[in-house]
Each structure stands twice: as structure tokens, then as C-alpha cells.
Amino acid sequence: MAKGKKKKMRAMMERSDLISSLPDVLLAFIISFLSGEEAVRTSVLSNRWKTLWKYSYHLSFDQRQILKHLIKIDNQNSKPRSRLARDVHPKILGIHPEDNAKLDTVAEASMLIMSIMDKHIGPLKSCNIRHLGMSCVNGDVVRWMKKLLEKGVVKVSMGLESYEYFITLNYILLGQAKRTLDLPFEIFTSFEVLELNHYCFITTPSLDLNQVLKTLTLNQVCVSSNNFQEIISHCSSLENLTLNNCDFSGDEVNIDSSSLKYFKILDMNVQKMLVSAANMEVIEIESIICIDKDLAFETPKLHILRVHNDVKRIGQYLRTRDIIEICGGIVVSLSSHITCI
């Protein structure tokens, strides 16, 4: 009787395992929705699943999740200032053996990410990585991006852990060092779609005939206005630009690009802004503070303008009417086909 029940249960399980009847291509697509380490774990399901994760289209990593248990203990046993100092100046400070073990664990997590990338066969199209500040300091982020280029990845999203805890403290220099991403320009422009989150961003623009960057999104990124202007002027393939709550550390922001077609700016505070883009077609503005009300658009081909304001903070932002008047005063004489939404 017991044997009969086991046999019946086995038959039911085989019938209910519909997912294994799917083709490998579809299974690899499904695995793409898992985090990198979870995708690798599917290899233990059966011989057939052993290498399926290596053909997924997307990889996603979260260093904080990988080290979740260690970080929880660390946060309980140390102060924010000591954690920042340890991350930024581990060798100078004379780290305890106990802390060295923690640093080694972070390094192991970084190597795990690199190892998964190495073992992936492809075609890998996109990758999303959220990481700890130490990976900026020790150069892991740049190494990961170089590896993704080798793999032929076209869409990348890189982001630093949430950094509110050190912004509110008097440890700005340490915090800024932990956030700083010094990225070679040839890497920056070699992905078709790039998103950067929570960095102090540095790069040295140069003429690069092989650049392919078409879509750039900067979320809560700090970059000097002069450096930003150089970056945009050297991105000859850039068509789509989104700026979300960025800090340009300067009085004036100039965006001069003949390739730009779409521009979105949201939750920004600037002194002045000039956008000069001969082929710009769409502008979206969501809640912008422009202290001097010096917001200018030289966009003769603009035909769609979308404006939205946060009604809870309406007094702080440029009014929708003001923005439309600013844009209209420049553009209407050049084009009568503007749609304001």
C-alpha cells in the first residue's frame, strides 16, 4: 500500500512539473528574472538545469542582499562613522583581525559576482548591480563594467547602496570618497543604455569614434557642471537623457548636443539651465526649482512638452505656466507644432 502511494505521488509530481517541459530558451528567459546567485542555484535542480542559467539574458546582483546577515550584525555592533572610515581607509586605520574578516567577506562577495559573470555563456544583454561603498573605493565597479563589456552587454544599471545615513552626519568627506565613481570615458560610452545611481561621478571626456551610448539616466548623481557639460558634448551618439535629483555643484548647467532627441528632468534644483539641442523632439519636466527663473531651451524641432509639478510643494517649483512661457517664447516662432501636455 505504501509503495502504491509513493508511486502515485511520484506520478502526480511528474505531471505537475510542467515547467520542465518548456524549451531551454524559455527557461533561460524565466531564470533572467532571478537574482544572480538565485539563478546559479537552479543548477542543482537536475542535469538539464545545470547550465541553463548561463544562457539567461539578464543578470541582477545586490551586494547588500548577498551579505545581509553580516551587515545586520555589523550595523548592530558598530557606529556609522567607524563603518565609513573602515570602508574608505581600511589599511591606514589599522583594522582589527575581526574587521579584516568582514572586509574579506565583502571581497568574496565581489569575487562571486565576477565569477558568475565569467561563467555566463550568453547572450547576456543586460545587467543590474547594487553594491556597497567599498566596491567604489577598491575599483570593483570599474572591473565589473569592463567584464560586462567583454560579454557584449548593451544595457547596464549600476547603483550604490542607500547613503542617507552618512549624508545627515558630519562625515561628508568620508561619505563622498565612498560614493566616488571614477569611470574611464571609453567604458562610460560603450554601453547603449546606462543608468548610474547615487554616485559622485568623475570621468575625463575624450574623442572616441567607437562610442555607442544612446540612453543615459542619472539618479541622485553628483557631478560638477563643467564636467557634465563636457561629458554631454562628447557623447556624439546620445539621444535620450534623464536627470533625476542630480547635484551639478555649479551655478549654471549647459546641455549642448546635436544628437539629443529626448530630455527628462525631474526633482531638480538649479540656478540656471540652458538646453541647446537642434534635434530635440520631446522634453519632460517634473518639478524643477530654478532660482533665477533662467531656464532656456534652444530646441527648434521640439513638438512635445510635458510638464508636471508636485502639488504638495507647488510654491517651491517653477509653475507649469512659467515653463510653457519659457519654452514657448523661444520655440513658437520656429515651430508651430508644439503639443503641451
Image (cartoon, grey):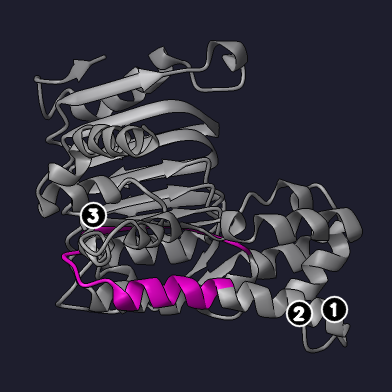
Name the mark on residue 281.
Answer: none
Residue at 64% in and 61% down:
67
In the image, the segment drawn in magenta is 109-132
Q: Is residue 89 in view?
A: no
**Label 3 crowd (10 A; few <14 / some 14-19 / many >=20):** many
Q: Is residue 9 above or below residue 321?
A: below
The picture places residue 246, in percent across and down from the top left corner, at 52, 47
Residue toward you, 234 or 184: 184
Local SS, label 2: helix
315 with respect to 321 (left or right): right
Look at the image and tell me whether residue 65 can be seen: yes
For marks 1 and 3 on the same chain, the one whose residue lies earlier in the sequence:
1
Is 116 covered by the magenta stretch?
yes
- Name the residue carrying label 1: 98
Give the vertical position of 57 relative to 206 (above or below).
Answer: above
Which residue does the image show at 35% across and 43% down from the upper left? Answer: 242
- Look at discs 1 and 3 and give the one toward the viewer: 1
Q: Is residue 153 left or right of residue 109?
A: left
- Residue at label 2? 101
The residues bearing labels 1 and 2 have C-alpha atoms spaced at a distance of 5 Å
Which of 31/130 is in front? 31
**From the image, which quarter does the N terminus lie in?**
top left
- On the image, the x and y values in percent for residue 30 come to 24, 45
- Residue receiving disc 3: 257
